[in-house]
Amino acid sequence: MIYYFSGCGNSKYVALELAKNVGDKLVFIPDAMKNGDFECNLKNNEMLGFVFPVYCWAPPQLVLDFISRLKINKTTVYTYFITTYGDNAGHTEKVFRAALKKHNIELSACLGIQMPETYVNMSGMDVDTKEVALQKINRAKDQLPELFETIADRRYLSDLEVGNNPFLKTYIVRPLFYKFLVTDKKWWTTNDCIGCGSCVSVCPLENISLNDNRRPEWKGNCTTCEACYHICPVHAIQFGKATKEKGQYQRFC
């Protein structure tokens, strides 16, 4: 069983490739949560995997909330995660291990893969140049077979780029990030909006609808995955003043 979450598509790409390589069932976490499907009925010797992006140097809170409600029918033999990040992962491993501990599950392997930057809602943060993004994607494609082999062989391994000052980033900055920046109240559209509805279709939480004027409206359940911002074909979606003149990433959206 592989549970995954993805906003801009990087983690979705990894999850799809992983499922093809190891032959496990793939479950999209927002769909499972919407349907109230928290029963994880593993077969004998079945692996339990998770794929998700790093959000502010930890797993997305949505993923952690899902794990807290997950009902696993037996002690797993091999449990792992693969996470995608633009720079580094901070203490993502420690946070994830703590979440699994509540189910008396030990993490067997934690693997990370660098992908293009997607978060743009803070000053000084922008997408990679097209050249850098392409380099990261090509490097990731070269590295994925080895990651999949690690999982297929059930190796015990911790391989994440933790980065500098991980405690500060994960345990001090992250709470502030969720308090002030994980919101949809700052999303708005310029007059360039053409009412195409791309933002509606791409939102993983079904948090966007078009009003009578065919302008997007956010409904209060946002994880700031940035999917709506990056998918907009005319770059009309903005987050306060933070995204002004910043780039978009659309490779896997």
Image (cartoon, grey):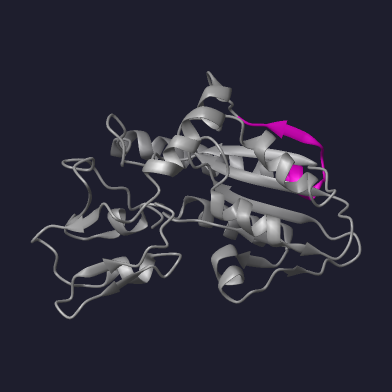
In the displayed structure image, the side of residue 85 where residue 215 appears, left or right = left
Q: Nearer the viewer, residue 221 or 151?
A: 221
**212 above or below 47?**
below
User: Picture coordinates of residue 170 (x, y %)?
Assistant: 55, 31
Residue 158 within the segment the image draws in magenta: yes
Name of the residue lying farthest toward the bottom: 212
Which quadrant of the figure contains the C terminus? bottom left
Choose top left, top right, bottom left or bottom right for residue 4. Answer: bottom right
User: Picture coordinates of residue 1 (x, y %)?
Assistant: 74, 63
**Residues in magenta, as a range:** 149-160
User: Picture coordinates of residue 148 (x, y %)?
Assistant: 69, 47
Instruction: State the residue at coordinates (63%, 67%).
Output: 27
Name of the residue lying farthest toward the top: 164
In the displayed structure image, the side of residue 235 where residue 63 appears, left or right = right
Instruction: State the residue at coordinates (17%, 81%).
Output: 212
Q: Nearer the viewer, residue 207 or 227?
A: 207
In the displayed structure image, the side of residue 175 where residue 107 appears, left or right = right
**26 above or below 130?**
below
Choose top left, top right, bottom left or bottom right for residue 135. Answer: top left
Q: Nearer the viewer, residue 13 or 109?
A: 109
> How many discs appear?
0
Residue 138 within the segment the image draws in magenta: no
In the displayed structure image, the side of residue 234 where residue 206 appears, left or right = right
**194 above or below 52?**
below
